[in-house]
Amino acid sequence: MGTLCSYAKNKRTVLFFAWISANIVTYYCCIATLQHHYLTVFIKRFCFLCRCIDGFSRKIVWLKAVSSNHRPGLIAKYFVDSADHLGGYPQHVRTDCGTENNIMAAIQYLVANDASAHVYDTSPGNQRIEAWWSFFRRYRSQWWIDIFESLVEFGAFHPGCEKEVEFLRYCFMDMVQKELDEVRCEWNTHRIRPSQGARCPAGVPDELYFVLQPPAVNCLLSDVGDLPPEVLAELEGPQTCDSSDFQSYLDYVCGFNNWDRPTDHESATQLYFNLINTV
């Protein structure tokens, strides 16, 4: 998802950028998908993080935990849903070269009717996104590292065992997503301090996006028709496990044993051990 638009204010020209990242998304839109370090070390292929961020305000449009980075229909679904929520599509989108972004790239070209509205770029080129991942790794993910590392040290999880990976997703994915929702809310409402050489203004991301006159949200492409049915058919909804059949089976096992869905990391850990000992 991304936008690039300019407007005149106080005889100056201000550029709005949005990048989407299936690791991260912003409004030049930068899209990237990240197999985050704390998950790759202890939980091989457990979780990928997808983020969309507006490059001018640095507002996080979405921040999602997904089980696979090979589902272009899911990334496109997040893209379309965010456009519906915000009232329009970005004018420009930048993504990494992963195949998970191809449907979204096609949608962006379709709604903008401009081949330059989408740009493929390497991850190092998405500097706003990569810098944010570094922030997240330092300040928010160590707690999860400790939990998952303890499972490995206890011998309860073996990286590379696909069944245990799916158990872990089933038990912890909702908890990870809850944490990401809190991160997104805190980031969008915190104040970014001025810094020398910054190309974007200081301030609160949500305020910069919605309140600044004219607001960044006004730069969206809103006068577009409905997407063709064949495009909508390619969109996929999120799922906890990589295999929907295995997820349905685990739902059955939990229902049969009257095991409730976890609400915190302690109940998620208990459910994980229940599944390990039962399935």
Image: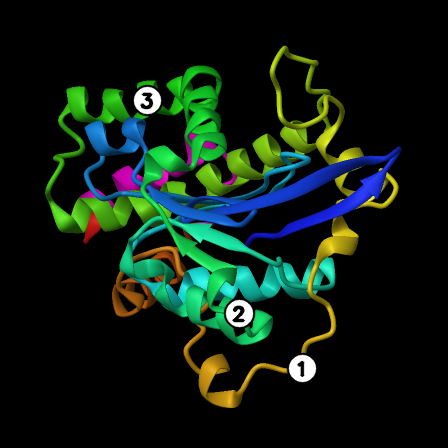
Q: Earlier in the sequence, mark 1 or mark 2?
A: 2
The residue where tag 2 is placed is 114
Magenta residues, as a range? Answer: 260-277
Whether residues under marks 3 and 2 lie with C-beta atoms below 8 angstroms apart, the answer is no
Residue 48 percent across, percent down from the top left: 34, 44
Which residue is pictured at 75% across the width and 27% down the height? 204
Q: Earlier in the sequence, mark 3 or mark 2?
A: 2
Residue 145 percent across, percent down from the top left: 32, 22
The 10 Å Cα crowd at callout 2, few under 14, some 14 to 19, many 20 or more, is: few
Q: Is residue 250 visible?
A: no
Frontmost residue, 68 versus 120? 120
The 10 Å Cα crowd at callout 1, few under 14, some 14 to 19, many 20 or more, is: few
The residue where tag 3 is placed is 145
Magenta highlight: main SS:
helix
Q: Secondary structure at mark 3?
A: helix
Q: Quadrant of residue 102?
A: bottom left
Q: Tell me the mark number nearer the camera, choosing from 1 and 2.
A: 2
Which residue is pictured at 38% across the width and 25% down the height? 144
Frontmost residue, 104 versus 168? 104
The residue where tag 1 is placed is 225
Q: CA distance from mark 1 to mark 2?
A: 15 Å
Which residue is pictured at 70% across the width and 14% down the height? 194
Q: CA distance from mark 3 to mark 2?
A: 43 Å
Q: Earlier in the sequence, mark 3 or mark 1?
A: 3
